[in-house]
Protein backbone atom coordinates (compact mmCIF):
# COMPACT_ATOMS: atom_id res chain seq x y z
CA UNK A 1 0.00 0.00 0.00
CA UNK A 2 1.43 3.36 -0.98
CA UNK A 3 2.19 5.51 2.06
CA UNK A 4 1.12 9.17 2.24
CA UNK A 5 2.58 12.13 4.08
CA UNK A 6 0.82 13.02 7.33
CA UNK A 7 0.86 16.75 6.58
CA UNK A 8 4.27 18.19 7.33
CA UNK A 9 5.10 15.88 10.26
CA UNK A 10 7.57 13.75 8.27
CA UNK A 11 5.45 10.71 9.24
CA UNK A 12 4.21 8.49 6.41
CA UNK A 13 0.93 6.61 6.83
CA UNK A 14 -1.08 4.05 4.93
CA UNK A 15 -4.28 5.51 3.41
CA UNK A 16 -6.27 3.35 5.84
CA UNK A 17 -5.55 2.89 9.54
CA UNK A 18 -6.91 0.41 12.04
CA UNK A 19 -9.19 1.81 14.76
CA UNK A 20 -9.05 -0.16 18.00
CA UNK A 21 -12.03 0.89 20.11
CA UNK A 22 -13.45 -2.63 19.70
CA UNK A 23 -10.17 -4.22 20.88
CA UNK A 24 -10.81 -2.97 24.39
CA UNK A 25 -14.25 -1.53 25.03
CA UNK A 26 -17.74 -2.86 24.45
CA UNK A 27 -19.69 -0.76 26.96
CA UNK A 28 -21.21 2.68 26.29
CA UNK A 29 -20.34 2.49 22.59
CA UNK A 30 -22.70 3.34 19.75
CA UNK A 31 -22.09 0.47 17.33
CA UNK A 32 -25.18 -1.14 15.76
CA UNK A 33 -24.89 -4.47 17.62
CA UNK A 34 -23.41 -5.66 20.90
CA UNK A 35 -20.14 -7.60 20.60
CA UNK A 36 -17.67 -9.59 22.69
CA UNK A 37 -14.14 -8.25 23.01
CA UNK A 38 -11.85 -10.28 20.73
CA UNK A 39 -9.47 -12.79 22.30
CA UNK A 40 -5.69 -12.30 22.17
CA UNK A 41 -5.38 -14.75 19.26
CA UNK A 42 -8.00 -12.79 17.28
CA UNK A 43 -6.19 -9.50 17.90
CA UNK A 44 -2.88 -11.08 16.88
CA UNK A 45 -4.52 -12.26 13.68
CA UNK A 46 -5.99 -8.81 12.91
CA UNK A 47 -2.65 -7.09 13.52
CA UNK A 48 -0.79 -9.57 11.39
CA UNK A 49 -3.32 -9.20 8.54
CA UNK A 50 -3.00 -5.42 8.83
CA UNK A 51 0.78 -5.71 8.59
CA UNK A 52 0.56 -8.08 5.63
CA UNK A 53 -1.81 -5.66 3.83
CA UNK A 54 0.59 -2.76 4.32
CA UNK A 55 -1.45 -0.94 6.98
CA UNK A 56 1.04 0.83 9.28
CA UNK A 57 -1.33 3.10 11.22
CA UNK A 58 -2.96 2.15 14.52
CA UNK A 59 -5.34 4.42 16.41
CA UNK A 60 -5.85 3.90 20.13
CA UNK A 61 -6.70 5.87 23.29
CA UNK A 62 -6.84 5.48 27.06
CA UNK A 63 -10.62 5.83 26.64
CA UNK A 64 -10.77 2.61 24.60
CA UNK A 65 -10.77 0.32 27.67
CA UNK A 66 -7.97 -2.26 27.43
CA UNK A 67 -6.99 -1.34 23.84
CA UNK A 68 -3.60 0.16 24.74
CA UNK A 69 -2.72 -2.63 27.15
CA UNK A 70 -3.55 -5.25 24.52
CA UNK A 71 -1.59 -3.45 21.81
CA UNK A 72 1.37 -3.17 24.21
CA UNK A 73 1.28 -6.94 24.58
CA UNK A 74 0.30 -8.01 21.05
CA UNK A 75 1.53 -5.46 18.49
CA UNK A 76 4.23 -7.23 16.47
CA UNK A 77 7.57 -5.46 15.98
CA UNK A 78 9.60 -3.68 14.92
CA UNK A 79 8.26 -0.55 16.64
CA UNK A 80 9.18 1.75 13.76
CA UNK A 81 7.09 -0.28 11.33
CA UNK A 82 3.99 1.21 13.04
CA UNK A 83 2.64 4.71 13.37
CA UNK A 84 0.86 4.82 16.73
CA UNK A 85 -1.77 7.48 17.35
CA UNK A 86 -3.06 7.87 20.89
CA UNK A 87 -5.10 10.48 22.78
CA UNK A 88 -5.34 12.47 25.99
CA UNK A 89 -8.16 14.08 27.93
CA UNK A 90 -10.67 11.24 28.26
CA UNK A 91 -10.42 8.23 30.57
CA UNK A 92 -12.94 5.41 30.69
CA UNK A 93 -13.57 2.99 33.55
CA UNK A 94 -16.47 1.04 35.03
CA UNK A 95 -18.21 4.33 35.99
CA UNK A 96 -17.97 5.68 32.42
CA UNK A 97 -15.97 8.53 30.85
CA UNK A 98 -14.26 11.34 32.72
CA UNK A 99 -12.41 14.28 31.15
CA UNK A 100 -9.36 16.22 32.27
CA UNK A 101 -7.58 18.51 29.84
CA UNK A 102 -5.16 20.01 32.35
CA UNK A 103 -1.42 20.26 31.73
CA UNK A 104 -0.70 17.79 34.54
CA UNK A 105 -3.24 15.22 33.29
CA UNK A 106 -1.93 15.36 29.73
CA UNK A 107 1.69 14.81 30.78
CA UNK A 108 0.81 11.92 33.09
CA UNK A 109 -1.51 10.32 30.52
CA UNK A 110 1.18 10.30 27.85
CA UNK A 111 3.74 8.89 30.30
CA UNK A 112 1.26 6.18 31.25
CA UNK A 113 0.47 5.40 27.57
CA UNK A 114 4.19 5.00 26.84
CA UNK A 115 4.49 2.48 29.70
CA UNK A 116 1.32 0.61 28.69
CA UNK A 117 2.23 0.45 25.02
CA UNK A 118 5.84 -0.46 25.85
CA UNK A 119 7.40 2.26 23.73
CA UNK A 120 9.52 5.36 24.24
CA UNK A 121 7.63 7.60 21.79
CA UNK A 122 4.19 8.09 20.28
CA UNK A 123 3.88 9.24 16.68
CA UNK A 124 0.80 11.41 17.22
CA UNK A 125 -1.13 12.38 20.33
CA UNK A 126 -4.56 13.93 19.89
CA UNK A 127 -6.70 15.76 22.42
CA UNK A 128 -9.81 13.61 22.80
CA UNK A 129 -12.42 16.34 22.74
CA UNK A 130 -15.56 16.23 24.89
CA UNK A 131 -17.27 18.57 22.40
CA UNK A 132 -16.00 21.89 23.80
CA UNK A 133 -13.10 22.14 21.36
CA UNK A 134 -12.34 25.85 21.59
CA UNK A 135 -12.65 26.01 25.37
CA UNK A 136 -10.17 23.12 25.68
CA UNK A 137 -7.76 24.57 23.14
CA UNK A 138 -7.80 28.14 24.42
CA UNK A 139 -8.42 27.77 28.16
CA UNK A 140 -6.96 24.45 29.32
CA UNK A 141 -3.35 23.29 29.63
CA UNK A 142 -3.53 20.48 27.06
CA UNK A 143 -2.11 22.38 24.08
CA UNK A 144 0.95 23.67 26.00
CA UNK A 145 1.52 20.23 27.50
CA UNK A 146 1.54 18.57 24.06
CA UNK A 147 3.99 21.20 22.74
CA UNK A 148 6.25 20.45 25.71
CA UNK A 149 6.04 16.67 25.14
CA UNK A 150 6.96 17.22 21.49
CA UNK A 151 9.98 19.28 22.49
CA UNK A 152 11.04 16.50 24.88
CA UNK A 153 10.83 13.99 21.99
CA UNK A 154 8.16 11.84 23.66
CA UNK A 155 5.67 12.56 20.88
CA UNK A 156 6.42 13.31 17.24
CA UNK A 157 3.29 15.33 16.49
CA UNK A 158 0.13 16.64 18.12
CA UNK A 159 -3.44 17.50 17.28
CA UNK A 160 -7.05 17.02 18.27
CA UNK A 161 -9.87 14.66 17.52
CA UNK A 162 -12.23 17.57 17.10
CA UNK A 163 -16.00 17.77 17.30
CA UNK A 164 -16.71 21.14 15.73
CA UNK A 165 -15.71 22.95 12.57
CA UNK A 166 -14.39 25.94 14.59
CA UNK A 167 -12.27 23.59 16.71
CA UNK A 168 -10.92 21.78 13.66
CA UNK A 169 -9.99 25.10 12.02
CA UNK A 170 -8.10 26.19 15.17
CA UNK A 171 -6.28 22.85 15.18
CA UNK A 172 -5.08 23.08 11.59
CA UNK A 173 -3.79 26.59 12.23
CA UNK A 174 -1.83 25.75 15.40
CA UNK A 175 -1.19 21.99 15.50
CA UNK A 176 0.10 19.17 13.26
CA UNK A 177 -2.83 16.78 12.78
CA UNK A 178 -6.62 16.93 12.93
CA UNK A 179 -8.89 13.92 13.32
CA UNK A 180 -12.18 14.96 11.73
CA UNK A 181 -15.44 13.29 10.78
CA UNK A 182 -16.23 12.69 7.13
CA UNK A 183 -18.82 10.30 5.76
CA UNK A 184 -21.73 10.11 3.34
CA UNK A 185 -24.04 11.85 5.81
CA UNK A 186 -21.76 14.37 7.54
CA UNK A 187 -20.17 17.33 5.80
CA UNK A 188 -19.72 19.90 8.61
CA UNK A 189 -15.95 19.32 8.77
CA UNK A 190 -15.28 19.81 5.04
CA UNK A 191 -13.95 23.39 5.60
CA UNK A 192 -11.46 21.86 8.07
CA UNK A 193 -10.19 19.44 5.42
CA UNK A 194 -9.85 22.27 2.89
CA UNK A 195 -7.91 24.41 5.38
CA UNK A 196 -5.69 21.46 6.31
CA UNK A 197 -4.87 20.87 2.64
CA UNK A 198 -3.93 24.55 2.20
CA UNK A 199 -1.75 24.55 5.31
CA UNK A 200 -0.26 21.08 4.66
CA UNK A 201 -1.52 19.59 7.95
CA UNK A 202 -2.23 15.92 8.61
CA UNK A 203 -5.85 14.74 8.35
CA UNK A 204 -7.14 11.51 9.86
CA UNK A 205 -10.77 10.69 9.18
CA UNK A 206 -12.92 9.03 11.86
CA UNK A 207 -16.42 7.52 11.57
CA UNK A 208 -15.94 7.08 7.80
CA UNK A 209 -18.44 4.21 7.77
CA UNK A 210 -20.81 6.03 10.15
CA UNK A 211 -19.59 3.79 13.00
CA UNK A 212 -21.23 0.82 11.24
CA UNK A 213 -24.56 2.59 10.61
CA UNK A 214 -24.17 2.80 6.82
CA UNK A 215 -27.57 2.95 5.14
CA UNK A 216 -28.58 -0.28 3.40
CA UNK A 217 -28.48 1.38 -0.01
CA UNK A 218 -25.07 3.07 0.31
CA UNK A 219 -22.09 0.96 -0.51
CA UNK A 220 -18.74 0.71 1.18
CA UNK A 221 -17.06 1.71 -2.08
CA UNK A 222 -19.12 4.94 -2.17
CA UNK A 223 -17.90 5.75 1.34
CA UNK A 224 -14.23 5.36 0.42
CA UNK A 225 -14.66 7.28 -2.85
CA UNK A 226 -16.38 10.12 -1.00
CA UNK A 227 -13.64 10.35 1.64
CA UNK A 228 -10.66 10.21 -0.72
CA UNK A 229 -12.28 12.81 -3.02
CA UNK A 230 -11.93 15.40 -0.27
CA UNK A 231 -8.83 17.55 -0.19
CA UNK A 232 -6.07 16.89 2.30
CA UNK A 233 -7.06 13.44 3.60
CA UNK A 234 -3.99 11.54 4.82
CA UNK A 235 -5.74 8.41 6.07
CA UNK A 236 -9.12 7.06 7.13
CA UNK A 237 -9.21 5.19 10.44
CA UNK A 238 -11.69 2.33 10.21
CA UNK A 239 -12.56 0.30 13.29
CA UNK A 240 -13.05 -3.42 12.81
CA UNK A 241 -12.58 -6.72 14.59
CA UNK A 242 -13.62 -8.75 11.55
CA UNK A 243 -10.69 -10.01 9.41
CA UNK A 244 -12.85 -10.16 6.25
CA UNK A 245 -13.95 -6.55 6.74
CA UNK A 246 -10.34 -5.54 7.30
CA UNK A 247 -9.24 -7.15 4.02
CA UNK A 248 -12.18 -5.68 2.10
CA UNK A 249 -11.64 -2.18 3.50
CA UNK A 250 -7.92 -2.32 2.72
CA UNK A 251 -8.60 -3.41 -0.87
CA UNK A 252 -11.12 -0.59 -1.36
CA UNK A 253 -8.80 1.94 0.26
CA UNK A 254 -5.96 0.91 -1.99
CA UNK A 255 -8.01 1.19 -5.18
CA UNK A 256 -9.85 4.42 -4.36
CA UNK A 257 -6.99 6.32 -2.72
CA UNK A 258 -4.74 5.67 -5.71
CA UNK A 259 -7.32 6.41 -8.38
CA UNK A 260 -8.42 9.64 -6.75
CA UNK A 261 -4.85 10.82 -6.03
CA UNK A 262 -4.00 10.29 -9.70
CA UNK A 263 -7.12 12.21 -10.77
CA UNK A 264 -6.21 15.14 -8.48
CA UNK A 265 -2.65 15.49 -9.87
N1 LIG B 1 -11.75 10.45 18.78
C1 LIG B 1 -12.99 10.18 18.63
O1 LIG B 1 -13.87 10.88 19.10
C2 LIG B 1 -13.31 8.97 17.88
C3 LIG B 1 -14.62 8.68 17.75
C4 LIG B 1 -14.91 7.64 17.01
C5 LIG B 1 -13.89 6.92 16.44
N2 LIG B 1 -12.59 7.19 16.59
C6 LIG B 1 -11.51 6.38 15.97
O2 LIG B 1 -11.89 6.13 14.67
C7 LIG B 1 -12.08 4.72 14.51
C8 LIG B 1 -13.25 4.49 13.57
O3 LIG B 1 -14.45 5.02 14.08
P1 LIG B 1 -15.67 4.13 14.45
O4 LIG B 1 -15.20 2.81 14.96
O5 LIG B 1 -16.61 4.92 15.28
O6 LIG B 1 -16.43 4.01 13.08
P2 LIG B 1 -16.26 3.34 11.65
O7 LIG B 1 -14.86 2.98 11.35
O8 LIG B 1 -17.00 4.24 10.76
O9 LIG B 1 -17.14 2.01 11.79
C9 LIG B 1 -16.76 0.93 12.53
C10 LIG B 1 -17.90 -0.05 12.47
O10 LIG B 1 -18.12 -0.43 11.12
C11 LIG B 1 -18.07 -1.84 11.01
N3 LIG B 1 -17.35 -2.17 9.77
C12 LIG B 1 -16.04 -1.95 9.48
N4 LIG B 1 -15.74 -2.41 8.26
C13 LIG B 1 -16.89 -2.93 7.75
C14 LIG B 1 -17.21 -3.57 6.52
N5 LIG B 1 -16.29 -3.76 5.55
N6 LIG B 1 -18.48 -4.00 6.34
C15 LIG B 1 -19.42 -3.81 7.30
N7 LIG B 1 -19.16 -3.22 8.50
C16 LIG B 1 -17.91 -2.77 8.72
C17 LIG B 1 -17.32 -2.35 12.23
O11 LIG B 1 -17.83 -3.61 12.60
P3 LIG B 1 -16.92 -4.95 12.48
O12 LIG B 1 -16.04 -4.95 13.69
O13 LIG B 1 -17.94 -6.03 12.47
O14 LIG B 1 -16.18 -4.85 11.20
C18 LIG B 1 -17.64 -1.30 13.28
O15 LIG B 1 -18.80 -1.64 13.99
C19 LIG B 1 -12.28 4.17 15.92
O16 LIG B 1 -11.94 2.79 16.04
C20 LIG B 1 -11.34 5.04 16.66
O17 LIG B 1 -10.02 4.56 16.52
C21 LIG B 1 -12.31 8.23 17.29
Image (tube, grey):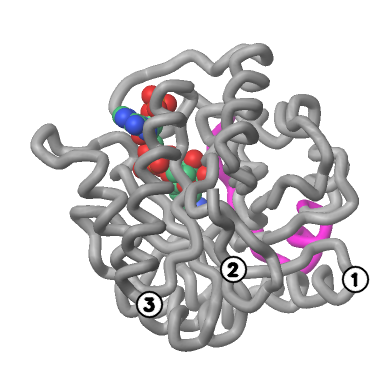
Question: Going by the image, does 229 lie left or right of 238?
Answer: left
Mark before the other along the chain sequence, 2 or 3: 2
Say which quarter of the image contains residue 152: bottom right
Which of pointers 2 and 3 indicates the residue nearer the eye? 3
Please tell me whether residue 204 belongs to the stretch shown in magenta.
no
Q: Which residue is mark 1?
A: 152
Please state which of residues 254 and 144 is positioned toward the viewer in this rendering. Answer: 254
Residue plotted at (45% across, 87% down): 198
Residue plotted at (15% across, 38% down): 215
Which of pointers 1 and 3 indicates the residue nearer the eye? 3
Mark before the other along the chain sequence, 1 or 3: 1
Residue 5's label in the rendered image is: 2
Span of residues in magenta: 94-109
Please tell me whether residue 102 belongs to the stretch shown in magenta.
yes
Mark before the other along the chain sequence, 1 or 2: 2
Q: Which residue is mark 3?
A: 265
Say which quarter of the image contains residue 159: bottom right
User: Where does ligand 1 appear, by image quarter?
Assistant: top left
Which of pointers 1 and 2 indicates the residue nearer the eye? 2
Give the SS element for disc 3. Answer: loop
Q: Position of residue 229 (x, y in %)?
A: 29, 65
Q: Position of residue 18 (x, y in %)?
A: 54, 40
Residue plotted at (40% across, 58% down): 258
Amino acid sequence: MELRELGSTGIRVSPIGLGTVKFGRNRQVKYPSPFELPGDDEIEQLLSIAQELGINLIDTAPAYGSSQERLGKLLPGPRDSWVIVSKVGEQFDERGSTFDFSHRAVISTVEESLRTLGTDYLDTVLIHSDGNDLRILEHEGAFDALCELKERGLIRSHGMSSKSCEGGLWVVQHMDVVMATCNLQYSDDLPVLEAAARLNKGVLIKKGLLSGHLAENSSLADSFTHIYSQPGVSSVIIGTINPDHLRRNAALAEIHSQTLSQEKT
